[in-house]
Amino acid sequence: MDLRFEAASLYAVRSSVAAHAAGLGATPEVMDRVLIVASELSTNAIRHGGGSGRVRLWTTDGRIYCEVSDTGNGVADLDSGTKRPDPRAAGGRGLWISRQLGDDFAISSGPEGTTVRVAIALHDARESTVK
């Protein structure tokens, strides 16, 4: 999946991600994680990255990858989202949530924009322990 988006198309992003994640073999629990990550990162692209972006979804080696890119001015601190934000803060949770839900997290940023890539195992080991 490769989809460009803007604020008015966030609902379409969410529904496309859900449909594609299911089609790629994600379990319901993994699909929930991917959907939250895609939603948080897409919202960040709109709020902080110039108002639009691109979301991509694919699988490789038993993982589903969600990558969101924007053309904003970049992220000043590539360690953003490594510490739990204050629950009283008005924002600042998107990267932290994405880091928590992903098995791997990578961010690259510069004056031409930011790309965040999150990988999640297609078959979540946590599912087998929950009965």
Image (cartoon, helix red, strand yellow):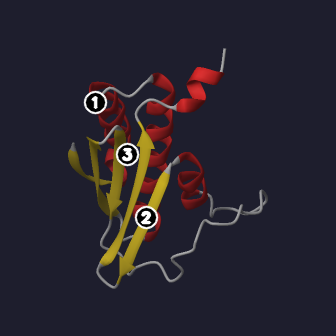
Q: Quadrant of the N terminus?
A: top left
Tag in front: 2 or 3: 2
Q: Earlier in the sequence, mark 2 or mark 3?
A: 3
The residue carrying pointer 2 sits among few (fewer than 14), some (14 to 19) or many (20 or more) residues within 10 Å by Cα, namely few
Residue occupying the point 51% across, 49% down: 102
Label ID, residue 24: 1
How far apart are the alpha carbons under marks 2 and 1? 21 Å
Under mark 2, the amino acid is Ala
The residue carrying pointer 3 sits among few (fewer than 14), some (14 to 19) or many (20 or more) residues within 10 Å by Cα, namely some
* Residue 88, image x, y percentages: 79, 59
Image-based side of 21 in relation to 101, left or right: left
**Viewer-proximal residue, 7 or 40?**
40
* Residue 14, image x, y percentages: 38, 38
Contact between marks 1 and 3 (CB within 8 A): the answer is: no
Q: Earlier in the sequence, mark 1 or mark 3?
A: 3
Under mark 3, the amino acid is Leu
Label ID, residue 106: 2
